[in-house]
Structures are given as C-alpha cells and as structure tokens.
Image: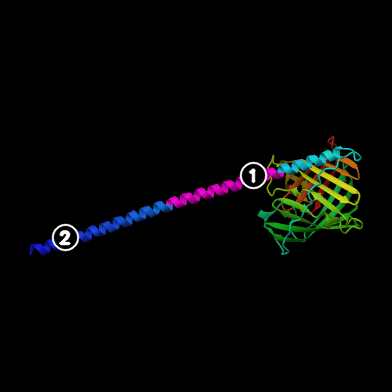
Amino acid sequence: MKTPKCIILFIIFSMMISSANAQLNRAIQRGVQRGVESAAEKKAEEAAEKAVSAAIDKAVEDAEADRARRRAEAEAALAELDADDADAPQSAPLPPVVIPEVGSSPYTPTESEYTFFAMKPGAVQVYVSKDDAGNIKSQSRNTIKTVTGDKNAYAIAYQTEILDETGKPTDLVLNYRVVVKDDMMYIDMKEMFGSIDGLDDMEVSGTPIKIPSNLTVGQTLDDATARIRIGFINCTSVITEGKCEAIEDVAVEAGTFRCYKVSQKVNSRVLGIRSEGVTVSWYSKGVGAVKTETYDSKGKLLSVEELKMN
C-alpha cells in the first residue's frame, strides 16, 4: 500500500513542479515580451524624436534660406533704385509672383483663425486719407464680396471704390483678391488693374508680402520686393526693416481697436521718380489696417489713413 501512495505523491509533486515551471516560463515570456515592447517603444520614440528634430531643422533651414533670398533680392532692387536710370545695369529678373490655387467653397474662419485682414463676407469698411494738416484728401470703400477656400489657403475677394474728399464715388472701382497661404499674402495685381483700360498688359514679379498670423513685440518681418511693368513703364517697390513695435489701443472714427504697431521702410520708383520713406501701420485681427501713417526720409509726416467705418 505504501508504493501507490508514493507514486501518487510523486505524480502530484510532478504536476505542481510542471505547473510552477509553466507559470515561471509564462512569467519569463511576459518579461521578455515587455522588454521587447519597451525596447521597440524606445526605438520608436527615438525615431520619432529624430524625425521631429530633422523636420524642425529643415524648416529652420528653409526659413533662413527664404529670408536670405528675400534680402538678396531687396538689396539688388535697392541698388537698382540707387543707380541712375540711364546707367543702371540690367539686374537679375525677379521671379514672377504665382498666386496659389484656392478652393471655391465658401469659408468662414473662426475668431481663433483670424489674421490681420477683414474676413467677414458682406463687411464694408470706409477709409479716409488726410494730409499732414488733417485735411481730407480722399476716401475709399472696401466691400468683402466672398471668402473661399479653407484654413490652409483662402481668398478674400474685395471691391474697392475710390471716393472723393466728400465721400462721393468716382469712376474708379477695383476688384481683386487677397490670397493667404502659409502666412504669405498674395495680391493679384493683374486682377486689380486688369479692368482698367490700357493696364491689361502687365507683368508682375517679386516676392509676396509675408504676414505672420501671430505677431510679437520686437519681431522682425521679412523683406518684400515688387516690380510692375506695363509696356515701357516700370514701377518698383522695396519693403525692408519691418518690425512689430508695440501692442496698443488705437482710437479712430470707427471705434477703438487693439492693434499691433508695425513699422516698415519703403523705397519706390514710379515713372523714374524715386521716393523713400517709412510707413507705420496699426493692424487689428479680423479688421486689418486701422491706421497708417506715412513719413518721408527725414521723418516728416506726409499722410494719415484711418478707418472711418467698419
């Protein structure tokens, strides 16, 4: 009778050992699996960090290259402006401005997406332009016809009516679009002036104006250069030394607005006449320019444009 009991006890002990070994093996397998998963996760995190770092480095390199290109083009254009027309060397041609494609679907941006433009279809803005003594010289009325596209690229279609000093319409009406993509502002100059007799044969080249969606005090803006050629008539404008000076409340006839004060140096030549000065503009999100002051090269105030109705 003793032998069967021993055999039974041995079998039970063997089963217990087998079960323990199985649990131990499963524990080892789970440990190994967790180690493998942890190693895989670590490698994935390291790969993701490297990819993000590489993308950031590439974006910084591209931004620096774009800034350097804009600076070189601005310097070349300034050198051309400084030279006498008769003796000016042929500068390298500026690249043509290509307006990005934008979808035709209506787009209504949220307030968090507002940039420094009026962005509500149907909105009407009236601006008044005054000389240095405060006398009204002219007015203009901007109407937003449509906003189309999406948050990645959108177009604001404007109609601008030029008014006289009393606010009466003249015969000059401009229809054009402002296209915004990747913080770049594109104005279709051909579209703007194409409806005017004699101005349909136009070449536009240069670099579009870059308007950051979020400005900070002390931030500098990229240079911009534009050249318009209509037959034998050349118009060149170079914008440099742009900077966000402050954030201020600005009171005009249309109300009081929280604005970003931006100064820029502007050099232009139109019909062979050279001009140099500084513009100081106050921009409000979702509104656009609330006030703009223009000074000559000696700091004398030349004109003021203010928002009269919004």
Q: Nearer the viewer, residue 133 or 272?
A: 272
- The N terminus: image quadrant: bottom left
Q: Residue 263 location, x and y as percent?
A: 77, 41
Q: Residue 136 location, x and y as percent?
A: 89, 47
The amino acid type of the residue labelled 2 equals: Phe
SS state under label 1 = helix
Considering only vertical position in the picture, is 37 above or below 297? Answer: below
Q: Look at 20% across and 59% down and name the residue there.
A: 14
Residue 103 seen in this snapshot: yes
Of the two numbered discs 2 and 1 in the rendering, the one whose residue sits closer to the viewer: 2
Predominant SS along the magenta part: helix
Residues at marks 2 and 1 touching, judged by CB atoms closer than 8 Å: no
Considering only vertical position in the picture, is 89 above or below 213? Answer: above
Badge number at residue 112: none
Residue density around tag 2, few if under 14, some if 14–19, many if 20 or more, within 10 Å: few
Badge number at residue 60: 1
CA distance for labels 2 and 1: 73 Å
Magenta-span inclusion, residue 296: no
Q: Residue 76 location, x and y as percent?
A: 80, 40
**Magenta span:** 38-66
| Residue picked out by circle 2 | 10
The amino acid type of the residue labelled 1 equals: Val
Quadrant housing residue 309: bottom right
Q: Residue 62 location, x and y as percent?
A: 67, 46
Quadrant housing residue 148: bottom right
SS state under label 2 = helix
Q: Look at 76% across and 41% down and name the residue there.
A: 72
Magenta-span inclusion, residue 62: yes
Residue density around tag 1, few if under 14, some if 14–19, many if 20 or more, within 10 Å: few
